[in-house]
Image (cartoon, rainbow, N blue to C red):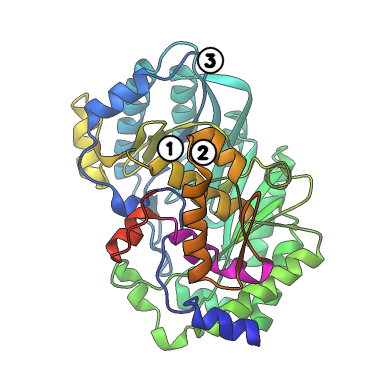
Amino acid sequence: MENLAQLRRLGLFEAKVPRYTSYPPATKFSNDVDSGVFAEWISTIPAGTRVSLYMHVPFCRRLCWFCACRTQGVRSDEPVRAYVETLKQEIRLVGQMLPEGVEVARLHWGGGTPTLLGAGMISDLADTIHGAFTHSDDLEFSVEIDPNEIDGDRLDALAGAGMNRASIGVQDFDPGIQKIIGRIQSYDVTREAVEQLRARGINSLNADILFGLPEQTQKRIADSVQMLLSLSPDRVALYGYAHVPWMARRQSMIPTDSLPRPEERLELFETARRLFKWDGYQDIGIDHFAKPDDGLAVAARTGHLRRNFQGYTDDTCEVLIGLGASAISKFPQGFAQNASGTADYQKAVRAGQLSTGRGHVFKGEDRLRARLIEALMCDFRIDSAEIRESFGVSESSLDTLYKAAEVAFPAMVSRDADGFSIKPEGRALARLIARNFDEYEMREEGHSSAI
């Protein structure tokens, strides 16, 4: 109870902070990055580099009320077919720009609902990607699967295209909660999708589940977690539901008074966390869990865990190329984001151009700050020797940052000769502590934290 009181005093239940899936967060992007900058950055990728591709499908058959992602509902396949043709055009355009000798090591299809594509469209898109890019022999090809929007033909097409990892959104199995959040997805439908995936040799499975949903209780989340565990996913993301109806208008369908209080949200998280731990899953960062032999767990143990727009990853590629409306690319020089609106994206690509409209050019201490924040989010620890060697920063400069965080979060962090750590009892505050190393956020608050 004392720790709960400390967490409350330090702002855990009131503070609004970035998720730090990138640094700086996408909310800090500007219009300084355009198609010319993207073209320059992609042309400088050295031969032999392994890169990641992300392909975005922004459509859903139904819009779930809890979701704040940039998606749009469709009832017919016509807008989907038109989008796929545009996407194929962008794939070929980007493929032509990529220097010789660059290999794709990771490929992820996200959305939206990528599996609303018909089997023919799936095969067509996959063939286009395979024709435009050189793939590594150990390519990991993952796809976000909606159990309500999948069938044998589409699974055959995905398996035939080389998919070897699937990600399934669960959210919650309780029928009452599903009704409130506008996401009806039974356990039986989910189990059938998992069985069909494994029957096709796709044995690597990710799953997402939410805490903090309306009418969610400890018993309800425990029941949902146990049902999920019966499907034996290799890794699980336990995300907190963010109620932001002023940003995602569909969330106004969810009554605010049905949401658990902030303290109750923490109890829901801890209930789920205990169940995953009891079943042998390893803690990964602030909200992921993985079986000990999964790549994510191995990365966490060996210091190779990373943070990207999908959350935690064992993908260490320095270049991520985003394809599709609103997709974000990452290069050593910065971030580049495609036009968010589907119409604007399609207009640019159909004219034979890239749709890059915003982004961020790394400058000043951006790379240093990004690594400090990523280390805290992934490992709860900053290794000073690694930072000094990688960025040429002095020990005294680092110590200045450490002291500021120590003052802000007393008893929750520690400093020693080797670096800076978040104590186990302070890990719920990881995002808040990371924010203390965020130059943009601190500047907005009137704090100067340049080093």
Which secondary structure lies at badge 1? Answer: strand
Can you say which quadrant of the picture contains the N terminus?
Answer: bottom right
Give whichever of 272, 152 is nearer the camera. 272
Give x and y (percent) for residue 268: 62, 77
Q: Which residue is mark 3?
A: 48
Give x and y (percent) for residue 62: 40, 61
- Residue drawn where x is 46% and y is 40% of the image: 118
Q: Which residue is mark 2?
A: 108
Q: Cβ–Cβ below 8 Å for labels 1 and 2?
A: yes
Pointer 1 local density, CA inside 10 Å: few below 14, some 14–19, many at least 20: many
Q: Is residue 348 above or below residue 92?
A: below
Which range is magenta?
A: 424-437
- Residue drawn where x is 44% and y is 34% of the image: 121
- From this viewpoint, is residue 184 visible? no
Judged by depth in the image, the label closer to the viewer, 1 or 3, is 3
Q: Tell which circle, 3 or 2, labels the residue nearer the N-terminal end.
A: 3
The amino acid type, in three-letter code, at marker 1 is: Met
Q: Tell which circle, 1 or 2, labels the residue nearer the N-terminal end.
A: 1
Disc 1 from disc 3: Cα separation: 22 Å
Q: Tell which circle, 1 or 3, labels the residue nearer the N-terminal end.
A: 3
Disc 1 from disc 2: Cα separation: 6 Å
Q: Identify the main secondary structure in magenta.
A: helix
Q: Which residue is mark 1?
A: 55
Tell me which corner region of the image, top left, top right, bottom left or bottom right, holds residue 185.
bottom right
- From this viewpoint, is residue 255 visible? yes
Which secondary structure lies at badge 2? Answer: strand
